[in-house]
Image (cartoon, helix red, strand yellow):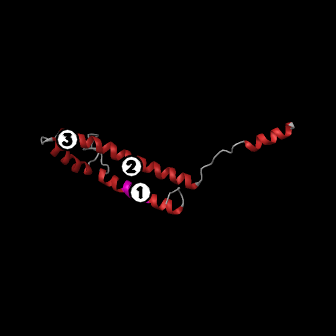
Amino acid sequence: YHCCEAMHTATMAAPKSPSLGMKDLYLILYNGACCIGWAYVLFVGIPSFFSAVASSDASLIDALKAAGSSVYFATPATAGFGDEVTPSLATVLFYVQSAALLEIVHAALGLVRSPV
């Protein structure tokens, strides 16, 4: 066993630094956009729901039902975060849920592993 063999095996075992390809960048952007969309839904939906329940004079069950149906059209203004013009929860929810259809396309194209 020579010192040259030791250096040769050491250089062969050195890991290469991973580089991101176009597929990886796309998937990161796709998942990031979905994450931001879901964060917006939670950011607007939860305070709007609790605000609607707290401001209702109805019984708790009726207040929960009314809050559940009204939160779909909530905006940051109805959630108590100001009066800026931003998309409603329904609009953002539509796009985030529609983007989930791309999961099927990703699997069909082989961009992600799928058990199917």
Residue at 44% across / 50% down in the picture? 33
Measuring from the top left, give residue 18's x and y in whole percent. 63, 46
Q: Secondary structure at mark 3?
A: helix
Residue at 33% across / 47% down in the picture? 41
Prevailing secondary structure of the magenta residues: helix
Q: Secondary structure at mark 1?
A: helix
Is 17 left, or right, of 37 in this rendering? right
Residue at 35% across / 46% down in the picture? 40
Tell me the amino acid under the disc marked 3: Val
Q: Secondary structure at mark 2?
A: helix
Inter-mark Cα distance, 3 to 2? 24 Å
Tell me the amino acid under the disc marked 1: Ala
Say if mark 1 contacts mark 2, CB within 8 Å: yes
Q: Residues within 10 Å of mark 2 (few under 14, many from 20)?
A: some
Is residue 42 placed above or below 104 in the rendered structure? above
Region of the chain picked out in magenta, as a range: 95-101
Q: Which residue is mark 1?
A: 99
Residue 14 found in image quarter: top right
Q: Which residue is mark 2?
A: 37
Q: Which residue is mark 3?
A: 53
Disc number placed over residue 67 in the picture, else none: none
Is residue 79 placed above or below 88 in the rendered structure? above
Q: Of the residues tagged 3 and 2, which is closer to the observer?
A: 3
Tell me the amino acid under the disc marked 2: Gly
Say if mark 1 contacts mark 3, CB within 8 Å: no
Measuring from the top left, give residue 59's x and y in whole percent. 13, 42
Q: Is residue 100 magenta?
A: yes
Q: Is residue 115 magenta?
A: no
Say if mark 3 contacts mark 2, CB within 8 Å: no
